[in-house]
Image: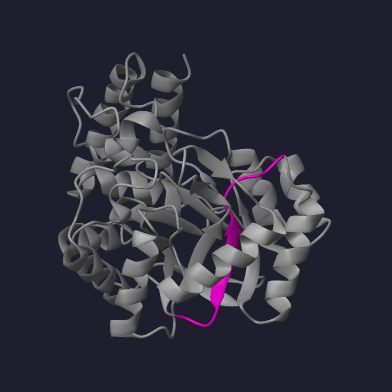
Amino acid sequence: MRYSYNQRCDARLSALGAGTWSMGGRNDYGLVYGSVRTRCESVDALHALIEGGVNVIDTSPVYGVYGTSESLVGQALEEVGRDGVFLVTKFGDYCDAKTGARIIDNSREDILKEIEGSLERLNTSYIDLYLMHYPDPKVPVSETMQTLNELKEQGRIRHIGVSNVTLEQLKECMEYAQIDALQVQYSMLQRSAEPLLKWAHAQGLMTMTYGSLGGGMLSGAFRTLPSFSEKDVRYTFYPYFKEPLFSKIQGLLDDMDVVAARHDVPVSHVALAWTAQKGFVTTALVGSGTVRSAKENCKAFELELAAEETRFLDESIERHLSA
């Protein structure tokens, strides 16, 4: 496993992070992420990741009904121990119990309510990194950040981070609190956040990427257009499983096959190594629903792409996806 030390978070962090979105199964909106795993499969997968050197675990109350993902992480950590794990969770994104509508709420009232539930489900007295899941235009940033500052002073959270923000929104948050981490979507298929990641890294922030395998597209498992349920997150959240983008990505996958064959590794290893070797990425979050996939994802971070291979892949991305 690769590691890097982040001074802001005062931690040695693994290049692979445990993404637990898919572990939650169906969420409060009624959406699902692929096949729903059993609690035992999910917990065993988390154990395998930790054994493989992963020390960053990312979750959220909205991943699964009533915080299923957080509960699974709490169970896994109860069995293997909390020491050495950099635990990340979020606030402000949930479903209205009466209407089923999605709500973004970064108010003081909501944060104080959510932190209680997260700490209980995670079976811990503190959270290493507490992320604002999405910006909330209805609530002053000063209110949100001041509440987080108070939680930090109380020792209930150790670091404050933000997710899914623009550079302007990140800078505004930094006016009211010390922001130690940024989490955004980034992969070979989604590079729009690259300038933001570079800026955050230059400021010393921990940077996390999600969607690192493009919802599974960059695993090479989808060579023909799949027929997902309209409730499947891969269909609703990611644009990759619809035409014409799906066919364009196949050209990139063909080039990735060449690099993968040269190293005798799965295509997913090439995608993860490409991200891991970006100097501005601290941790790439990847979902691992089984022990087998957990071990396979850990092995991906042993791969070192040569400079000419990285250039070849970058050129392939431009050639196939820029049009």
Residue 139 percent coordinates (x, y): 74, 47
Residue 187 percent coordinates (x, y): 44, 40
Residue 212 percent coordinates (x, y): 40, 46
Q: Is residue 174 shown above or below 139? A: below
- Image point 55% across, 73% down: which residue? 128
- Image point 35% across, 53% down: which residue? 64
Q: Is residue 257 shown above or below 172? A: above
Q: Is residue 1 visible?
A: no
- Within the image, what quadrant is residue 43 found in? bottom left
Residue 110, magenta (yes or no): no
Q: Which residues are magenta?
A: 124-137
- Image point 15% across, 60% down: which residue? 292
Q: Is residue 33 visible?
A: yes
Q: Is residue 321 shown above or below 184? A: above
100 on left or right of 205:
left
Report the residue that reaches farthest toward the right. 175
95 on left or right of 202:
left
Residue 133, magenta (yes or no): yes
- Within the image, what quadrant is residue 104 found in? top right
State how many labels appear. Answer: 0
Report the residue that reaches farthest toward the front. 98
